[in-house]
Image: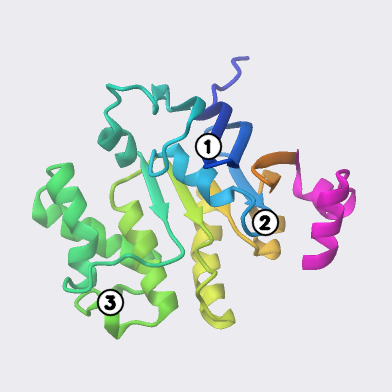
């Protein structure tokens, strides 16, 4: 029986802002098809870790490999690596002057050289998947926050990525639209997408995560299954955090 290699591998990763360590000797593996949920207080380094995976944030020390490619190498084809990494941010980052459909087809046509008709057809399938097919010809400003975030997820999926990174995708949404977005993410997880998710949504973590990671002050203090996190956390800092959010 062969053991799968990690699709993301981080070793001894550190990132400093002046004297402050945003990441302090962080090591983490994520395996194909795995759903990893990262939790922790504000300022703990969660978003910095996520952004370092596709080099949106450069780091000072350590190694980061994505699907076998060295992200930190001087000659790294970082744009090609990013094409395999779909990323969804807190803010939707949609192009306001483009329709929803155009937002989805721009990258596949420009970067993957997908024929426009094929890109349009794929985009419509994805809009159906996130339950907003009827919004294809609207502009982002005409949509609710939850709808815009579902467009952002569909846009990331339009590049057919191997991995999806989510950086607190529901933090700017109200409770009703949060549910809409989480439903889409749960569906993705059930379909086998490799996912790394920074979130405070503990119900989502309990349902979807294969593994949870707790960060504080730039360090990973504990890892384990949702069952472990919710019933028997070990680190005093994690115990306190779980008590505060549950």
Q: Which residues are magenta?
A: 222-246
User: Circle 2 — which element?
Assistant: helix
Residue 211, magenta (yes or no): no
User: Circle 1 — which element?
Assistant: strand
What secondary structure characterizes most of the magenta part? helix
- In front of the other: label 2 or label 1? 1
Q: Which residue is mark 2?
A: 205
For marks 2 and 3 on the same chain, the one whose residue lies earlier in the sequence: 3
Tell me how far mark 2 sits from mark 1, CA to CA: 27 Å
Q: Is residue 226 visible?
A: yes
Tell me how far mark 2 sits from mark 3, CA to CA: 29 Å
Q: Quadrant of residue 31?
A: top right
Within 10 angstroms of label 2, few (less than 14), some, or many (20 or more) residues? many
User: Circle 3 — which element?
Assistant: helix
116, above or below 63, in the image:
below
Rendered image: mark on residue 15: 1
For this view, does 41 lie left or right of residue 2?
right
Within 10 angstroms of label 1, few (less than 14), some, or many (20 or more) residues? many
161, above or below 61, in the image:
below
Q: Locate residue 144, reporting x and y percent.
A: 39, 82
Q: Locate residue 162, reporting x and y percent.
A: 40, 39
Within 10 angstroms of label 3, few (less than 14), some, or many (20 or more) residues? many
Q: Which residue is found at the position 56% from the left and 82% from the top?
A: 176
Q: Locate residue 230, reporting x and y percent.
A: 83, 55
For marks 1 and 3 on the same chain, the one whose residue lies earlier in the sequence: 1
7, above or below 164, in the image:
above
Rendered image: mark on residue 140: 3
Q: Is residue 194 visible?
A: no
């Amino acid at each position: 029986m062969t053991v799968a290699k990690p699709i993301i591998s981080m070793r001894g990763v550190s990132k400093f802002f002046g004297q402050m360590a945003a990441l302090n000797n962080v090591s983490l593996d994520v395996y194909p098809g795995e759903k990893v949920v990262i939790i922790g207080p504000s300022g703990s380094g969660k978003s910095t870790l996520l952004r370092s995976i596709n080099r949106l944030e450069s780091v000072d020390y350590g190694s980061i490999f994505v699907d076998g490619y060295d992200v930190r190498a001087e000659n790294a084809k970082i744009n090609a690596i990013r094409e395999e990494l779909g990323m969804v941010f807190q803010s939707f980052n949609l192009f306001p002057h483009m329709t929803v459909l155009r937002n989805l087809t721009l990258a596949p046509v420009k970067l993957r050289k997908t024929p426009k008709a094929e890109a349009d057809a794929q985009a419509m399938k994805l809009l159906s998947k996130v339950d907003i097919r009827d919004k294809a010809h609207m502009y982002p400003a005409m949509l609710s926050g939850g709808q815009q975030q579902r467009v952002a997820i569909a846009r990331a999926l339009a590049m057919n990525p191997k991995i999806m990174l989510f950086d607190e995708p529901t933090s700017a949404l109200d409770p009703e639209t949060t549910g809409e977005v989480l439903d889409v993410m749960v569906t993705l997880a059930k379909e086998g997408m490799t996912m790394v998710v920074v979130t405070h949504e503990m119900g989502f973590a309990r349902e979807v995560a294969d593994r949870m990671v707790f960060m504080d002050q730039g360090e990973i203090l504990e890892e384990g299954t949702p069952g472990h996190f919710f019933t028997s956390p070990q680190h005093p800092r994690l115990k306190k955090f779980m008590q505060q959010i549950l």
